Amino acid sequence: MNIQLILLPLLLSFVFPLLAPSASATGPRVTTALFTPHANEIHTVDFPPYISTDVVDGGAVSEIIRTALKEADIDAVISIHPLKRMVNYYLFQENALAGVGRHLHFSDVQKKELILIPLVVLQEQYFYYKPLHPQGLKLDADHLKQLVYGSHVDEDVSRYTAAGCAVKYGSTMSLFKQLKRGDVDFIEVTPLTVEWLLDRHMAADKAKFAHLPGAGDDEVLYMIFNRKHAGGEAAAARFKQALTGMVKDGTYGKILDKYLGAEDGKLYLRRLESFGSVPGL
């Protein structure tokens, strides 16, 4: 018998355990920090056109963050993930320096570990699929109990469920597909995100989606620093100071205008100058 055929199973029995992942692993261990010279990562989900690998230079909010990090002398890179639970994993399991997020639904214990700094307030609107609701929608108490709301993960849906409205969950893109199928009746999202996603993924149906008159809710996009990280509190203080300086010297506004234009910026954003009562400021 060929000696190589005899030795091969023996060799594999030693090598395979070294290559196979551990059965006790609790989550993803490989991060982009392994392939960059930066000491830390800022974890976030893809959220075009504000933060995305599909936008030039990562989008307006990405540039605001990078500029503030540089001014604050914080060595970190932005890592964009497809799922929100990955961001939460790195924050709470890996004790990463910081993350970026909205629709926050942290427990009281988790909140004590975090420092929230508002980056921008996004003005949202309610969208529906016109072919399924040719007469439009009414979101009063009498009609909500007959409708299904499409929610993002961790979005506060208590007012809908209290009114008897059913709720289904998904990413923004999957929610638009659910609107078209009739699985959900309405969703709430920023119009610039709607325009970006529909132009690229559902262009033929874009005109069939409509929004209700008037504005929806204001949704805050936060920078979330981690107190459990050795440098978390100090970095948060320096970042906040740098961001305040960017507002005062006009850098913040120039970045938003560069990506979104003055018109869209005024229509769909509340800038830091107008925050006042936003938690974390």
Image (spheres, grey):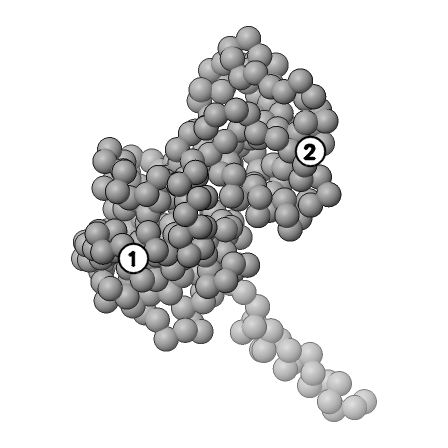
Residue drawn at (52%, 58%), measured in percent from left and top?
Answer: 55
Q: Is residue 259 above or below residue 222?
A: below
How far across and how far down the image is residue 154, in percent?
Answer: 45, 35
* Neighbour tally class for label 1: few under 14, some 14-19, many 20 plus, Cα within 10 Å: some
Side of 257 relative to 48 (left or right) = left
Q: Is residue 263 above or below residue 131?
A: below
Residue drawn at (56%, 41%), measured in percent from left and top?
Answer: 194
Residue drawn at (57%, 48%), measured in percent from left and top?
Answer: 196
In this view, the residue in front, 223 or 40, is 223
Give the quarter of the figure containing the C terminus: top left
Q: Which residue is mark 1?
A: 251
On the question of residue 244 being in view, the answer is: yes
On the question of residue 179 being in view, the answer is: no
The part of the image, by quadrant, that contains residue 238 is bottom left
CA–CA distance between discs 2 and 1? 38 Å
Counting residues from the start of the chain, the first of labels 2 and 1 encountered is 2
Residue 208 badge: 2
In this view, the residue in front, 72 or 19, is 72
How far across and how far down the image is residue 82, in percent?
Answer: 53, 52
Side of 45 relative to 254 (left or right) = right
How far across and how far down the image is residue 147, in percent?
Answer: 60, 19
Side of 271 relative to 158 (left or right) = left
In this view, the residue in front, 174 or 39, is 174
Q: Determine the secondary structure under disc 1.
A: helix
